[in-house]
Each structure stands twice: as structure tokens, then as C-alpha cells.
Amino acid sequence: MSVSFVRQLGAESGVQLNPLRDNSEIPTSGSADRNFGIMMRATRGRIDKSFKVDRGNVLSKLGKGEQVRISALNEAWVHVVEALNNGAYEAVVQRLVTDAAAIKWALVEVDGVTQAITFSVSETEPVAPYLLSIKHLECFNDGIILEFRADEKKTGGSAVANKEITLRLRDSDGVLLYEFLGSLDATAKDDYGNSFYLPDVVAAQTDTVEVSVGVTGTAAAIDPASNAYGYDTSGKEKWATSTALVCFDEGGTAFDAEDYSLARVQLESTPHDFAYISSGGTQSAAMLAQLVQLAFDTNRQLRFDVPGNLGVDAAISFVEALSMGASETAHLLHAFWFPVKCNDPTGINPKGYFGVATLNIAYACGRNSQANARGFAPKNYPIAGRNWAINRLRMEQIVSPSNQQLNALAKAKINPCIWENFSGGGRFVFRDSLTSALVDSSLRKLISVADMSTSIDESVVRYGNDVLQLPMKEALKRLSNFLTELFEGAEASGWLVPSDTPEMEGRAWRFDVRPNAQHPYDRIDCSYWLRYDGTARQIFVTQTLTR
């Protein structure tokens, strides 16, 4: 083929074609505001780092769940499953474990004389010789099932040992998790010249399973006499299959402050993004303290439950003991109290108390998926009131607060989730939308403002990262243009309204981007002032009779 250009032109005559430059990219926030993060106890899931689950794989990733009567910690599983079925796109999960948790090795050994196959579990890293050693990092409490086989291989019309095997991992119910085809020979290559060695094949496909081969030479093959070789007399494939091998010891569920702290650090450092933090219904002050710290460190909103079996005074005491209002970012902390007995939305528990803070997050995630032409979701509409009914079955309200008690709850920054009457009939709803900020007349008291302001901050800092290491003049120009477009879009979407503060001059937003006075060569100061729209929480109605 004739090429009429070069990529790099020297002193010679010719045409240099430079690589395509892309100036069309438009900054986006992705799907982070449709996801939530949670620290929880589960019967399945990695313990070394956070992982994502969605409604399609939640049962295989987290297990089937266990009843709350066994442990109150199991309520978090109910929250996650319900949320994923009601608007949340993904949950970013950090599994809680103690320092006594241990991952063990599944071991496959073959007798060199009889070809008998033995499956076992080793608490320490196996020492060769052995056929296979498997480390399953998804840590199933209920164990895994291994099975493997080698296809029939003939030389000169006679069956010979085969180095290539198929290895499968199943859960305890027999559901296939992984299937790998590879060789027991460390030098094996596939048709494209890539390593066909089984440990390398596994590593290329997943980071949740580690496989090692503990034999070499002629021992690194499946003998024709093996029960894992070829076919039986009826023509069916012969597989060597284990019973359920329990390769993970949870080490108990007596979590302490150090366990919560480690989980918080892992959830904070995950590459998986999320916009909301769920408490999972926990009543642990130590865990809630770590979640508050996570909200501060990540500028994400934490929505937590006040136990539904508490009366009004006890609910207020529960929140006051947590001192949420003392946090520097109290506007990011939102308390929900659901004094209602209902059916478990997942069906594994009997009727009882199940928090709704994570359901509120799920509704917010569903709302956020409906962005307008400028990319803004209707976050100025809080998840509260008539349009956001709590969709559970056999709900029975145990406490009906009086007006004075509702006043006390509002002063304590608790959002009651109770029965309310509307023009179209009554329903259970999120009755209020207050943050934990200890303010009386301020936008910081409104959850909708927390939702909008954190979104704006996230967009600005992400774009700030985009312009780092550019020339100062170019960075200033790009950042100014970005803020103008961002705030114009926010105002057009109803997030921002004109301010009556004199310095705002009737505008809804203004910003200032300039080099730092003391460090003008490498620092930029970026400040912005915004007037968010509020939320109609109170309406005063007066009827006057006239003649």
C-alpha cells in the first residue's frame, strides 16, 4: 500500500501527519450519583478490597443473606438488595471482617500409583508436590466446589497422559462461578504465542482466583487411568468433583473500632465511585463514627437509620448521643426514623423493623438517572413527600408522633418516615428532608442543597484535576470557561436562583479564578458563590371571610 505521509519528518522533503487531536471531549460525572457505598457484614465477598454488586449478581456476590434474628448485622444485606431493586445502579461494598478472618487453600492431590484423587483444605500455603492449589479470594462462608478433567488424547491409537485440563469452580449450590482451560506445563503456549500455563490463564481472566501447580515433568499431566480423564462407558465426560470445601473462616462478627476503621480506609481508597454512603441500618456508634469520617473525607452524603423500635424520646436520645451536629460537615449527615413494622422486602425475615435510609438513597439514585439536556438531574427535588412513597408490604405504624413530638424530631434533625394524608389518599412517606446541620435558617439544613452542592463540588474538583500540570494561562482559561458553563447549566436546571445579597447583584452565581498572590507561578485560587433553590417545608394557610 502506498503511504503519502510520515509520522516524523526530518530534514527531508515530505508531509508529516500528526496524530489526531481531540478537543471535543465534554466533562462528565459518569454514573457515580447512581451508586452508593456501604460497609457491611456478608457471607460472601472479598475482604481485601471493596467490590461492586448490581441487581443481577448481588446474590452470587454477597450470598443469600441470613436472618436478622441470628444477628442484627444481617439487616445490611436486606438494605442492599432492596436498594438495587429500587433505583440504585450499583453498590460498592466493603465487607466487614475481624483480624481473625482467614483464607485457606483448596488442595487437589493425586496418588502417583493408584491415580486416586483427594480434595482437601489447607490452612497454610501448600508445599509441593500436589496437583493444584486454589485460593478463592471471594471468601464464601458456605464453601466452593472444585471439578476438573482432561480430554482424551491419543498417540498411535493409544490414550496418553494429557497436560491440558479444564478447571471449574462452583458455589455450594453447584452454580458455575469460573471455568478455565489451561496446561499443567509451565512452558505451554497457545496458538497466538501467549502462555497457556493454567496459573497464567487464570490470572489473565480474574483476580479473584489464584491457582498454582505443584508438579512438574511427567507428573504434570492427567493419566488415562484417572477418574478425571476422558469419557465413561456411556460416553459422558468424566469429572473429578469435590464436596463443598470451606476455604474461608470469617473469624466471628465481634467487630471493634479497628475493624471499622480498616473498612473505612479501604472503602475510601477504592477506584469504584459512589455519591452516597449507607449505614446499612447499623446501631453501632463506632461504625457510625467511621462513616461520618468517611463522609467528611470524601464529601459524600451519609444517610443513616434511627432504630424504628425506639419511641420519639429514645430516637432523639440516640441521635443526640452520636453528636452528628458537631461534625464539620454535618450537612452531609441525614437521619431517618421509620417506626413501622413491615414485611422484609427480600422475604428472608419475618415481619419486623427495617430501616429506610438506604431505600431513600435508592430513590435518589433512580432520580439521578433522569438527567436533562445539560446533564443535570433533578436534585433540587428531595426524596421526600407525596411522590416518594415507601413501597413495602403489611406496614403497621407503631408510634404516631404528636405535633409537639414532630417539632422535637425536627429540632433534633430527624426525618420521620410515617403515614401522611394527601389529595390522592394516604401513604407512608419520608416526611421531611433535613440534614444534621445545627442551623435554623440556612440552606445547609436542606438535604436537596447538600445533594446539589456536593455534585457541584465534585464536578469542579474533577475538572481541576483535568487542568493540573497545564500552563497557568491555559489552566485559568479552561477553568473559568468550565465554571461559566457549569453554573449556567445549574441555573437553567432550577438548581440556582437569583440571590438578594448585594454583592451578588441579583445573580444566582459568581466565581473568582486567579493565581495565588503569594505563589502566582503554580497555585490557582478558585472561589465560587451560589444561591441554591430551597425546599417548601412549611406552608401557612389563612382563610378570610369577607362580606
Image: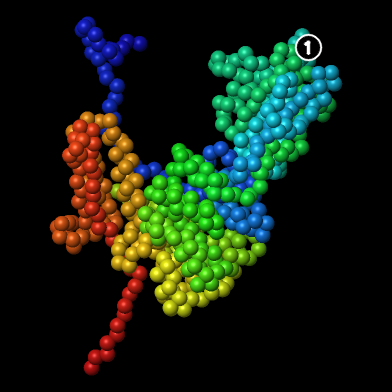
Q: In this rendering, is residue 510 above or below 547?
A: above
Q: How many marks overall? A: 1
The image quadrant of residue 120 is top right
- Residue at 56 percent across and 73 percent down: it is 398
**Helix, strand or loop under label 1:** loop
Q: Is residue 174 visible?
A: no
- Check disc 1: other Cα within 10 Å, few if <14, some if 14-19, many if 20+: few
- Residue 123 vertical placement versus 330 (above, below): above
Q: Quadrant of the N terminus?
A: top left
Q: Position of residue 371 (x, y in %)?
A: 36, 51
Residue 48, can we see it? yes
Tell which of 91 and 291 is nearer to you: 291
Q: Residue at x 40, y 46 (%)?
A: 298
Task: Determine the image quadrant of residue 472.
Answer: top left
Q: Nearer the viewer, residue 61 or 248?
A: 248
Can you give x and y, in whole percent of width and height, for residue 481 in the image? 21, 41
Lateral position of residue 313 relative to residue 472, left or right: right
Q: Which residue occupies the extreme right position in the image?
A: 114
Query: Left of 151 or right of it: where is 525?
Result: left
Q: Is residue 464 above or below residue 231?
A: below
Residue type marked 1 = Gly
x and y percentages locating residue 351 in the rendered image:
63, 65
Using residue 438 as the reference point, say whether residue 430 is left or right of it: right
Q: Position of residue 411 (x, y in %)?
A: 40, 70
Residue closest to the eye, 239 or 213:
213
Residue furthest to the bottom in view is 547
The residue labelled by disc 1 is: 157
- Quadrant including the C terminus: bottom left
Q: Residue at x 43, y 78 (%)?
A: 404
Residue at x 72% of width, y 32% of height: 122
